Image (cartoon, rainbow, N blue to C red):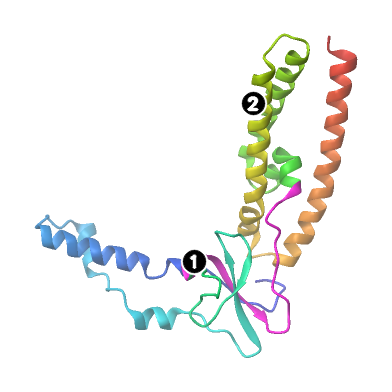
Amino acid sequence: MTRTAARCYTGLHVYGSRYGKAWVMAKRAKKTGHKVSKVERMERDAPAPSLERAARDTPRSRPGMRLVGYCKACRCFVELDKSLADPHGHRRRDMAIIMELPVDKPIYHIPQFNWGAFLMPPIWGAGHGQVFAVVVYPMWLMVDNLLWAAIHGRASMLLAALALAGTLAFMFFYARMANYVGYMRVLTTMSPDEYCAAERKWTIACAGVAVLMAVFATWYNLAVRV
């Protein structure tokens, strides 16, 4: 981690799985008499899973520090013990990252819901390397047209309601995953606290743009569109 006193370990949950999978595949090929290819020979020569090796690779916190992990499943930081597990049942492979934290510092907290990503997915996504979020723009236009047509008796109100519900569901799901994806993108340059501070600014900016767009759409539908 830059600008912090913590060391960050990434991909630790992957250790041992590649060796273990290769070892099992090579054993299975040998048992069935399958012709061993060059790739399979490399896998066969890979070392079998070793508890000693895994223990040696397990990070240890320095004096005055403790280990915390960012869980991929619940998208929150959790305290870890020496075996990289916690009392709530999170396992090593559940950790997206593992980092050190001073013993006297409160555990990091990253919100599980990003309001900036919910209010303006296209702008938030483009600013966080997720350009695909611009797909929400045509979804908004479709919902706007369906609602306008349904109000004026030119389309089914049920269809408009379904389109609105589907769009809001997509935006909600996207906002639930936004902070996890967003922080994984900047974890080498920003601490969780710095990331959250930046996201508060993003939320204010996206809320302002969302209000302006809502006002413009209302004015257009009432004053211009006939």
Up-down relation of residue 112 to residue 24 (above or below)? above
Query: Does the stretch in magenta take in 93?
Result: yes
- Direction from residue 62 to residue 117 in the image, left or right: right
In the rendered structure, the answer to whether residue 133 lies left or right of residue 223 reads left
Residue 136 is situated, as x and y percent measured from the top left of the image, at: 67, 33
Q: Which residue, as the protein is rendered here, is positioned at the far bottom?
A: 63
Q: Residue furthest front?
A: 158
Specify the amino acid type for callout 1: Gly
The residue depicted at 44 percent of the width and 79 percent of the height is 57
Q: Where does the image place residue 134, in percent across and percent down from the top left?
A: 66, 35
| Disc ID at residue 162 | 2
Query: Residue under circle 1?
Result: 11
Between disc 1 and disc 2, the foreground one is: 2
Helix, strand or loop status at disc 2: helix
Give me the residue at 11% from left, 55% from top.
35
Task: State the extent of the magenta-drawn residues as a range.
Answer: 92-115
Tell me the amino acid under the disc marked 2: Leu
- Name the quadrant containing residue 65: bottom right
Q: Earlier in the sequence, mark 1 or mark 2?
A: 1
Does residue 91 appear left or right of residue 184 in this picture? Answer: left
Image quadrant occupied by the N terminus: bottom right
| Image coords of residue 217 (percent x, y) | 83, 25
